[in-house]
Amino acid sequence: MASYTDAASLVNSTELLKDFYLPAIQDQLNGDNILSDKIDVNETDVSGEIAKIECHFGRNKGVGARGDFALLPDPGRQRFKKMDVPMRKLYGTVAFSGPTIAATRDEKGAYSKIIDTEIMGVTNDMQKEVNRQLWGCGYGILARWRSGAATAVTLQKSYRSNSVGGDGFGSTFGQKYLEEVPSGVWNIPQSASAAITTMTLGTTDMAPTTFSEGATYDSITVTDTSTPIGGSYIVRPASSYTTNASTSAGYARLEMMGLRGIVSDDDLDEIAVFNASNAGFGVNDPLQGLAVGTYPWWKANVDKHSGGRYSAQRSLTLVLMQKMFDKIEQKAGKEVGPDLILTTTALRREYITLALTNHQTVNDMSLDGGWKGISYNGVLLYTDNDAIDGEIYFLTTKDLQMYRMSDYDWMSKDGAILSRISGYDAYEAVLFRYAELGCNRRNTQGVIADLSYTAT
């Protein structure tokens, strides 16, 4: 069979990917966002594909004052709860055609440019993907639709008061996680199709259908004949499994855990799956296996609207911010937490306006690694483009860890990084990482939700 490739070029390509590109990729992706950069990586407590976490939730109660010759306190102990956290598997693929490799085999500069374009491209795309996942709850929600017949679906665009399907996590996104292309058309990222998860109470929680790219500014054309249910959401292709009432907890979650799942006083299914009245249903899916109904101490500090989260918006105040700061400091310890505050640019503007109105000085702050933001009580307040609209997160990063079974690396178990694509004159390389964001103390994290802001 004729070959369009040069063996030496393929060997050189493998070395180039491994020795030149991989270290740069690891450096970039491990420092791509402030969460990845500021929380510790833990590989010691990963056994097989499971991270082992011990959550400290109770102190020794064998203490107390006594009189002379009184019975001493009964011995107590520190209380821990063990949790298992499965690794999440992330991938990025690049491909090169045989003729392209052959045509540039004698032109090192040209070949390096082709490699550079694809490798840097997939690195930037994975960087964006990981950052988005670190703001989610593992279910891969890109947007939530509001209504529609079998041929067109209108996405949730409003932060609240959506006409059909209620308000909920995902309604706040609008189209921020979808990719805009020329002429104001919104496409599904990096794919011509994607799964739509529809929920049917008591039977099927996630029944994937498919839809094509395109339509207009706020709608997507559906190729399936079913009518979408209000509150359903959009995920990447194959990024969520179909579940039913007997499916095990966490089965549908393929993405990494994010702040919305951790910094919450709900179980994960209550965050991701809801009907028109915002009631969670289907398989119970608690964070790291601990249901908040059974373990009431397994909750973050959530300051939300009195009518319930996403029910309405309220103005940001300095009192709200200080109350949340104080709550976290009391739980984590002074000068331990919170040590990082994350929000959107819109809410940063709201805070700056508040501070200036109250004649307070807003100081700039820098951290190691080049991170720059403004200071609140001596803690960096930093913005993220993927942050959830209307929310400010107060984090204690020592109680968050990135559990990792493998750092970013190339698949090469068959002896080569570039592998031939069966049936094609082409080769591909696959970048992968096995990791998961875990939490050992949820009550040292906090969020102020349902905040109003002036849009850009």
Image (cartoon, helix red, strand yellow):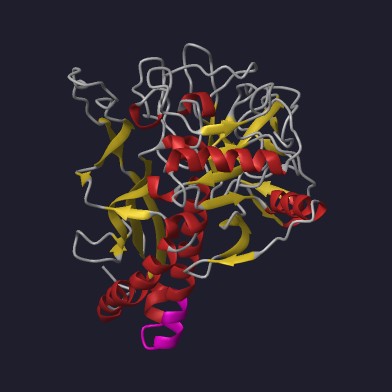
List x then y, in percent, for residue 392. Answer: 62, 44
The residue that appears at 72% across and 50% down in the rendered structure is 351
| Residue closest to the far right | 357
> Image point 45% across, 84% down: which residue?
110
In the rendered structure, the answer to whether residue 392 lies left or right of residue 89 reads right
Give how far across and how far down residue 117 sits, in percent. 49, 72
Which of the pair 95/1 is nearer the observer? 95
Main SS, magenta region, reads helix
Residue at the image point whose x is 34% and y is 72% from the top: 23
The picture quadrant where one finds residue 36 is bottom left
| Highlighted magenta segment, given as a residue range | 104-114
Is there any visible trace of residue 142 in the rendered image?
no
From where the camera sits, is residue 305 visible? yes
Vertical side of 321 occupied by 419: above or below? below
Residue 221 image position (x, y, % from top left): 67, 36
Residue 253 image-quadrant placement: top left
